[in-house]
């Protein structure tokens, strides 16, 4: 099956799941996570109509974003301080910020480029030690800092669910959706209109994320890998 066929199928399934949940399919953006493919793979997805792409390494983001400036690039990976200027130069959205000094550095880099950087804050809802993200308790402090950084536009929250159990994933996504509403009163007046995004759901758990209210699903293997369906069937 081709990338274009898989892209179309994923979009159709996401739309059908939205409708089954009583949601408008236009509320959910599918971000094609292209980290496992080269520019030919991106070109194929662009040709099929994909408008949003995600990358988790600056070294892959930069060349792809400059080769395909007509689509929107999302940085979803581990943020290293020294790469923040590069990431800010190429990404429309950064999903994976959660350290105070990284927020400050991203604000500085955006100021230099005279841009407003869209960001989401990554939250470690599950509390797994292996996962990045701020704890739900520390989120408030981070929001207060973001409110003071004029070149950052705080658009929402991101999380990764523990793998392997759909009920646990669903609970994790429900928690993030609840948190978005809980912290909304803390968001600055300027950012209030933008603070609507929930970046949650990947190839294995996007159905749970749609049911929980996600607005951005980050899907890699189900679009770009031949093996994904086989793995799912065996699982
Ligand atoms: C790779 C990756 C994804 C996509 O995962 P798949 O299981 O391939 O859909 C989503 N989010 C992040 C942060 C990733 O690193």
Image (cartoon, rainbow, N blue to C red):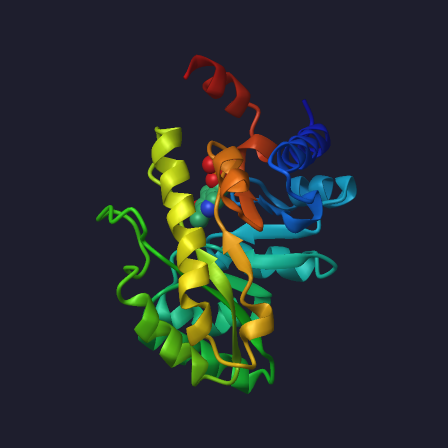
Q: Quadrant of residue 92?
A: bottom right
Residue at 56% of width from left, 81% of height from top?
190
Residue 189 on image: x %, y %: 54, 81
Up/down of 189 relative to 20, above or below: below
Up/down of 32 relative to 187, above or below: above
Residue at 58% of width from left, 66% of height from top?
90
Residue that extends furthest to the top in the rendered view of this protein: 234
Camera-nearest residue between 53 and 28: 28
**In the rendered image, which quarter contains the C terminus?**
top left
Q: Quadrant of residue 168?
A: top left
Camera-nearest residue between 78 and 155: 155
Residue 213 on image: x %, y %: 53, 47
Q: Is residue 13 left or right of residue 233?
A: right
Residue 91 visible, this angle: no
Q: Is residue 56 left or right of residue 16?
A: left
Residue 193 on image: x %, y %: 60, 72
Q: Is residue 54 left or right of residue 138?
A: right
Residue 194 visible, this angle: yes
Disc tally is: 0
Up/down of 13 relative to 220, above or below: above
Camera-nearest residue between 225 and 52: 52
Camera-nearest residue between 144 and 223: 144
**In the rendered image, which quarter contains the N terminus?**
top right
Residue at 65% of width from left, 30% of height from top?
13
Residue 46 on image: x %, y %: 73, 46
Residue at 47% of width from left, 20% of height from top?
232
Residue that extends furthest to the left in the rendered view of this protein: 129
């Amino acid at each position: 099956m081709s990338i274009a066929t898989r892209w179309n199928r994923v979009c159709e399934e996401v739309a059908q799941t939205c409708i089954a949940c009583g949601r408008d399919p236009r509320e959910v953006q599918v971000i094609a996570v292209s980290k496992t493919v080269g520019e030919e793979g991106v070109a194929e997805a662009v040709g099929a109509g994909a408008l949003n792409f995600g990358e988790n390494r600056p070294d892959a983001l930069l060349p792809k974003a400059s080769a395909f400036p007509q689509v929107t690039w999302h940085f979803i990976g581990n943020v290293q301080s020294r790469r923040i200027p590069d990431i800010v130069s190429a990404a429309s959205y950064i999903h994976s910020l959660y350290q105070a000094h990284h927020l400050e550095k991203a604000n500085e880099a955006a100021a230099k480029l005279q841009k407003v950087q869209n960001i989401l804050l990554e939250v470690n809802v599950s509390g797994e030690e292996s996962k990045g993200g701020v704890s739900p308790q520390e989120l408030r402090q981070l929001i207060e800092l973001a409110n003071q950084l004029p070149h950052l536009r705080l658009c929402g929250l991101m999380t990764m669910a523990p793998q392997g159990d759909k009920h646990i994933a669903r609970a994790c996504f429900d928690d993030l959706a609840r948190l978005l509403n809980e912290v909304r009163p803390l968001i600055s007046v300027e950012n209030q209109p933008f603070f609507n995004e929930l970046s949650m759901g990947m190839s294995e758990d996007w159905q749970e994320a749609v049911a929980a209210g996600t607005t951005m699903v980050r899907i890699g293997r189900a679009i770009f890998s031949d093996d994904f369906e086989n793995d799912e069937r065996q699982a």
